[in-house]
Amino acid sequence: MTRRRSAALLLVAWAGLVPAAAQTPQAPAQPPAPAASAPDFARLEAEQSAANGKAGPRAVPGRRIPVPGTVSPEFQAAIAAPYRAPAWNANPGSAAEWKALVAKLAAQTAAPLPALRERLGVVSTPETIGGVKAWVIAPREVPARNRNRLLVHIHGGGYVYNPGEAGTLEAVLMAAFGGFTVVSFDYRMPPDAPFPAAMDDAMAVWRAVLRLQRPENMAVFGTSTGGAMTLALMLRARQEGLPLPAAIAPGTPWADLTETGDSYKANEWLDNVLVSYEGYLTHAAKLYAGTHDLKDPQLSPIYGDLRGLPPTILTTGTRDLFLSNTVRTHRKLRQAGVEASLQVFEGMSHAQYLFNADAPETREVFAEIAAFFDKHLGTDKDPGTDKPSGAEAATR
Amino acid sequence: MTRRRSAALLLVAWAGLVPAAAQTPQAPAQPPAPAASAPDFARLEAEQSAANGKAGPRAVPGRRIPVPGTVSPEFQAAIAAPYRAPAWNANPGSAAEWKALVAKLAAQTAAPLPALRERLGVVSTPETIGGVKAWVIAPREVPARNRNRLLVHIHGGGYVYNPGEAGTLEAVLMAAFGGFTVVSFDYRMPPDAPFPAAMDDAMAVWRAVLRLQRPENMAVFGTSTGGAMTLALMLRARQEGLPLPAAIAPGTPWADLTETGDSYKANEWLDNVLVSYEGYLTHAAKLYAGTHDLKDPQLSPIYGDLRGLPPTILTTGTRDLFLSNTVRTHRKLRQAGVEASLQVFEGMSHAQYLFNADAPETREVFAEIAAFFDKHLGTDKDPGTDKPSGAEAATR
């Protein structure tokens, strides 16, 4: 099997986040086709100047935006891919239809995971942690400096996608590229279990892992909904008097459920993963939040008091519909005096670093987060006790 | 004079970077007007799905993007402002016409500077440093910990705009908000003096300030062209065996003169400062670079070997035409093992943090850069010598 075929076969579907076309072997994107009728600059210059002659909303013309040559061939293919159907604009008419769609996409996402784990040298062990169904995911050989460290992973999927093992993809990538032991858990979701069930489960897991490992040796991370839940978990743990981890990594967090933020509009139709907030996100937000105030920091942590949060590394991309969520969270953290690091990847749409384990950009994202965790997490066992290490305890 | 009127009067024009309308008192942006014929989501969903049904360039529809409510009223006004005419699409037909335009815009930019300095408590003293015309700009009272520190500022303006005192605006803001002594200099520019005259002048200044202050106590910063020159100066100083400063702050650097980078297209017509690369930038690049290879790292430092560069803080905005320049530079620095920090501001177009000294975002940008410098710069006089401090020597 050639290197190219091997890489292509390992393209991973996350909650149906990858359209079927992207899961088949695919050559790097072709040079962009010219627009059907390429408008000349002078005409656009005149039209646009007239349309933007007064203060107000920004008028932008319809256009075709090329696949950038500034990213890897693997990432060019991801950027060139069609909109992620049917996930981006799913709008099932009933709870039963939601569940059927979610189950179908989850099965597609979970199917390639055993092969991925095998190839990346990662082992997944089902557990129950804090009463919540979970997996302990670790490299076959945990590096010595990570033996007393434990990460908690909160999966994404708009509070509706990625039940079961489908939610563990990001934990597999982190275990593989960071060399960490990771607990990933299957929180309850709507339509059956709306807010605050997911956060209740997250709290139960956090409470439980605090009995397994020192908080100084732990971090929490997750993408999209998992990024928002990571932030909300910090607020709730603080409120309930529990210790916080040494670091967190919210990836492109859904930090604002009120559809507030410039990139919700500026990157609409450009992001090929989420595409538009008017797709499934408005429906998912309603399913999850019901009649709760969307500005409740447990739903939209951007509105919370972020002072005292652990050192935070945030990840997003220039085409991400959640670019504003991410940079607003970064600024709010900095304003609150929190050590916060931001990484923004060229041309990347929402959470696209989860789609292809072989893209250099994917490895770079996780290497940066792992380095950040390595800098902030302790390595020692609890001094003076015989408390076992996270890896040992969690897999016992 | 009311607070609002005072703030409005202090809107600053930088190289004609602010359209005339934005320089008059202006209320915060109105709520966005609805599009003339608001397309309904179902129609867009169908049209866009069809237009993006195959791998390739991304088709985006024409639309009106609201002024975000997630920024300060001052910044809402900046985002709502019309395209920056005549600077963005200047295309004079001769060297004489270029010089006339540049002189006119520079006069507009320089005019409000004395009042701005006065209000911000900053003093500017003309000097000649390394044979280059310069200004030493400092707060009336330099804080004790900055007395042995010196910053070098390289102004922006596409290698054509901001000759003379017009180039000192950013230095005034840094002196005011960071409490530093800053040397800002008037490098030669085309049409009279194309590449490498500007870099020759930057090197002459760097060589000269090394006789005034310890490199451990110095930083170099600048925006746009000044950001690119900051990076190129590091490469050239290293090559010529000179020490590097303790930190640098390239703001939204024109790091790639080859028109390569996703946001050159993705943020085209959205950025109301640069608007389009096909505006004046292509002409300015040609005026400056002539027939030199645009991939020469002295012209496009993104193609240079960035290993060993000093700790770097980069600043950009989500609507910035140079968003890709900035995030690509950040990633390249990180890949080269350099400590590099990225800040991205909500809704901000190119270099828009220079336009209104009273916008909270402006102060936040400079406060972050100042904190980064404070973390990395030494404070002591050269031990064992009677070398005077930068502030003392430069203003002597």
Image (tube, coloured by chain):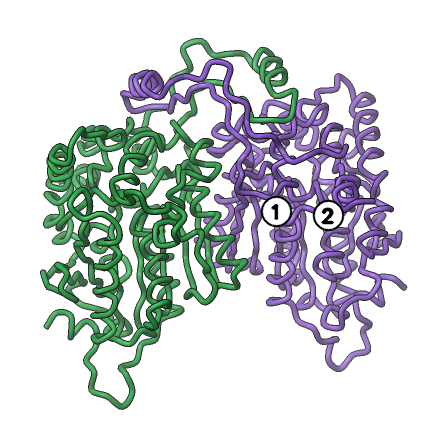
Chain colours: A purple, B green
Residue type, mark 1 in image:
Gly
Residues under labels 2 and 1: Cα distance? 11 Å
Residue situated in front as seen by the camera: B375 or B206: B206
B257 shown above or below A149: above
Residue A190 falls in which quadrant of the image?
top right
Q: Which mark is residue A170?
A: 2
Q: Which residue type carries mark 2?
A: Glu
Label 1 sits on a secondary structure element that is strand
Q: Quadrant of the C terminus of chain A?
A: bottom right
Give the percent coordinates (x, y) of residue B219.
32, 65
Residue A238 visible, this angle = yes
The percent position of residue A183, horizontal first and vertical second, equals 78, 55
Which residue is rendered at x = 39% and y = 21% of the image? A59
For this rendering, which residue is in front, B298 or A193?
Answer: B298
B369 vs B22, left or right, is right
For residue B201, which quarter of the picture? Answer: bottom left
Q: Secondary structure at mark 2?
A: helix
Please rate how many residues cluster around mark 1, counting C-alpha atoms within 10 Å: few if below 14, some from 14 to 19, many from 20: many
- Residue A66 point in image, percent of width and height: 52, 29
Q: Residue at x 24, y 69 (%)?
A: B207
Front residue of B192/B319: it is B192
CB within 8 Å, label 2 to label 1: yes
Residue at mark 1: A251
Residue B75 in the image, given as x and y percentages of width and height: 33, 37
Q: Is residue A92 above or below residue A215?
A: above
Q: Is residue B93 left or right of residue A46?
A: left
